Image (cartoon, rainbow, N blue to C red):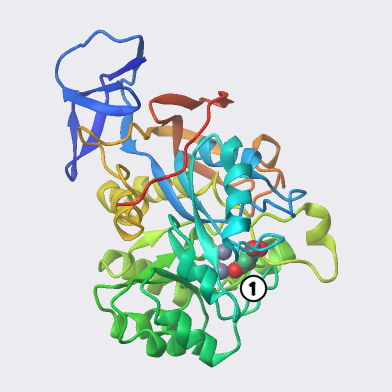
Amino acid sequence: MTLLIKNAKIFTKGTLINKNIFVENEKIRKITNQNLMADKVINAKNKIVLPGIIDSHVHFREPGLTGKEDFYSGSRAAASGGITTILDMPNTNPPTTTVERLKEKRRLAKKSVVNYGFHFGSTSENIEEIKNVKNVASVKIYMEKTTGDLIINDDEALKRIFSLPITKTIHAEGGQIKKALELGKDTLSRLYFCHVSSKEELNLIIENKKNNVFIEIAPHHLFLSEQDKEKQGSFAEMKPSLKVKEDQIALWEAIKNNRVDTIATDHAPHTVEEKHQINYPYGVPGCETILPLLLNAVNDGLLEIKKLVQLCCENPAKIFKLKGKGFIEEGFDADLTIIDMDLEKEVNNDSLFTKCKWSPFNGMSLKGWPVITIVNGNVVYNNGNIEHVRGKEVEYN
Ligand code: DOR
Ligand code: ZN
Ligand code: ZN
């Protein structure tokens, strides 16, 4: 199968240029001025082609919590949001803390319509499993209580895990961030701080930032604040919680100053019924809104396209060593997101693909949307419709 995307502006080597993209055997074969013959042609006039968005932080809930989401529904949400690769978190039921369970998760994930990879879970008892696990993006360390039972309170266990030569993704807030930085200060492996949400946390990490320390920000912390909690109640409750305007400004400032490494959704769906319960769970979905929110910010002059691509494509690929991902270059995987910067639409709960069918951004009018998503050279999302294709598990450099 060959595909030609023509008449678009494409984002390559740090800039937008007018070229055609010729895809063959799932890869970007040629970036060219030629109108090469192909089995399928996409005329992308007045559109922009970006590298497919990589969402390095999602909770697709399988196994065990599939009332909220599963790899099929979650990946459809991702595709419709312009995401071509997701990295799934381990706080499922059972949690992904053994090699055997990871094997089962790999089987379940085969129904994903986008590419996928996994973060492995850690407990105070599974160090041997962590040592044995292969081909995962990272080991996730929960230093605070969240959905599921994955939390490590035991300092000796934390020390042992931090000393392993594997990338660590860390859920920590406030004082726990300090502890994580301390525990990780001598390690050469990567420390990836998830969903940094406050000015204080940000400053603490930035002060200690070495080239193996990375900062992720979630879109809800960029586009919502405490006031939204008053309006939306539990539907605007997640961990870490929404902060005040001052924190939000600090996050944007840090993006501007190149202190932030990635933006990832922390897509954490829960059902409407669950959110109405007195002991509601924390988390909000995000795969379908990350890109329109950021493109709208580009249209508003808050963000450059180049920065967006660094944060959502290039850096996640580099940090998690994803082979063939993150760039529009010859030889790279044909994971591509075609966007329309002039398309203006409202986020609408009824048209979402996530199983939970709600968004904290419902009703928000945004300008700049993904219109076509291509995974391994196959069109998976096209203007509201999802095609039956299958993603693949990522490989690591
Ligand atoms: O709000 C959150 N929800 N924060 C987390 O860290 C976990 C997530 C979930 O899995 O629901
Ligand atoms: Zn978390
Ligand atoms: Zn999370």
Regarding residue 200, the answer to whether it shows in the image is yes
Q: Is residue 13 left or right of residue 260?
A: left
Regarding residue 195, the answer to whether it shows in the image is no
Percent across and percent down for residue 292 are: 47, 44
Percent across and percent down for residue 389 are: 53, 26
Q: How many marks?
A: 1
Residue situated in front as seen by the camera: 226 or 376: 376
- The residue depicted at 25 percent of the width and 78 percent of the height is 210
Question: In terms of image quadrants, where is residue 280?
Answer: bottom right
Percent across and percent down for residue 256 are: 28, 64
- The residue depicted at 56 percent of the width and 72 percent of the height is 122
Residue type for callout 1? Leu
Secondary element type, mark 1: loop
Q: Is residue 281 left or right of residue 374?
A: right
- The residue depicted at 37 percent of the width and 84 percent of the height is 184
Q: Quadrant of ligand 1?
A: bottom right
Residue found at the very far left of the displayed protein: 33
Instruction: Count neighbours of disc 1 (C-alpha within 10 A) and say few if under 14, some if 14 to 19, many if 20 or more.
Output: many
- The residue depicted at 43 percent of the width and 58 percent of the height is 137
Residue situated in front as seen by the camera: 390 or 132: 132
- Mark 1 lies on residue: 150
Q: Quadrant of the N terminus?
A: top left
The reply to whether the residue tagged 1 has its Cβ within 8 angstroms of ligand 1 is no
Q: Is residue 320 left or right of residue 173?
A: left
- Vertical order, 192 against 355 (above or below): below
Percent across and percent down for residue 295 are: 40, 45
Residue situated in front as seen by the camera: 337 or 235: 337
